[in-house]
Image (cartoon, rainbow, N blue to C red):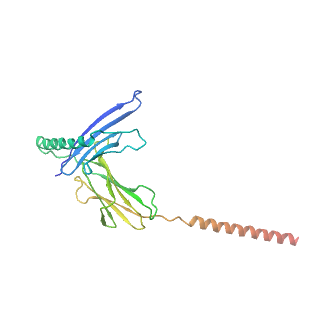
Amino acid sequence: MDLFGFLLIFTVIVSNGAQAEHRDFQFTGCSDTEKDDLNGFDGEVLYYTDFIRKEGVVIAPDFADPLSFPGGYETGVAQMEVCKQNLATDIKAYNSPQEQLDPPVTSIYSEDEVVLDEKNTLICYVTGFFPPPVNVSWTKNNDIVTEDISFSQYRDNSDGTFNMFSALKFTPAEGDIYSCTVKHRSIQGQPNTKTWEVDVELPSVGPAVFCGVGLVLGLLGVAAGTFFLIKGNNCN
């Protein structure tokens, strides 16, 4: 079983006027196949360690005050070693206790309004699961998709569960069907799959037709009324 060890560190900062509370957090998680190390503030990730590219990544936008995490990557690597040692020790100490398992809830939606033949992004949002990891895969018209896919870091929810999302860049074409499949060890039987179909509604012509017909009939009625009025005056 792919067990997952993690460490959460929270610091609550209260403003001078005691009007607002903010939460600064650090998350470190590891398993046989997963590595995660990130820092954030008020639920937003500000920095994470990219173990594939071997660098630390700052996510704060350019217009924000400059942020830096000196030695962040090296610290993340060291945290992984500590996490793995702690995980192995805990497994022995607690005699591999049965894990708490919370199944994920999945939704799929487009980032922008869908316009045929214009590039867009599909987002598969997975939340409410415990523990990490989850496995997310995509298909297009039942064919497996492996390109133009990205995955977020795991983020913690206030109830102790986690969330993450996967994004797929695509160009919508009428009738295409996409699916997002989520696997987690809490799910028994078939994986959790959500589908999304490109279905762009054409503007309805009904109101325009009715308005046009009504306008024509109205003009004909005015013309007829004017004709009979003139005839009546001539008779007099």
Residue at the far right in the pictured view: 236
Taking the image as shown, residue 216 lies to the left or right of residue 87, namely: right
Q: Position of residue 130 (x, y in %)?
A: 25, 47
Rendered-image quadrant of the C terminus: bottom right
Taking the image as shown, residue 36 lies to the left or right of residue 17, namely: left
Residue drawn at the location 26% of the way across and 58% of the way down? 191
Q: Is residue 181 visible?
A: yes
- Tell me which corner region of the image, top left, top right, bottom left or bottom right, holds residue 16: top left
Placement of 223 over or under 100, stated as above or below = below
Q: Position of residue 48 (x, y in %)?
A: 30, 44
Number of numbered discs visible in the structure rendering: 0
Taking the image as shown, residue 99 lies to the left or right of residue 152, namely: left
Q: Position of residue 231 (x, y in %)?
A: 83, 72
Residue at the far top in the pictured view: 16
- Tell me which corner region of the image, top left, top right, bottom left or bottom right, holds residue 11: top left
Q: Position of residue 154 (x, y in %)?
A: 29, 47
Taking the image as shown, residue 35 lies to the left or right of residue 199, namely: left
Q: Is residue 156 visible?
A: no
- Tell me which corner region of the image, top left, top right, bottom left or bottom right, holds residue 226: bottom right
Residue toward you, 222 or 235: 222
Residue drawn at the location 54% of the way across and 65% of the way down? 204
Residue drawn at the location 11% of the way across and 43% of the way down? 92
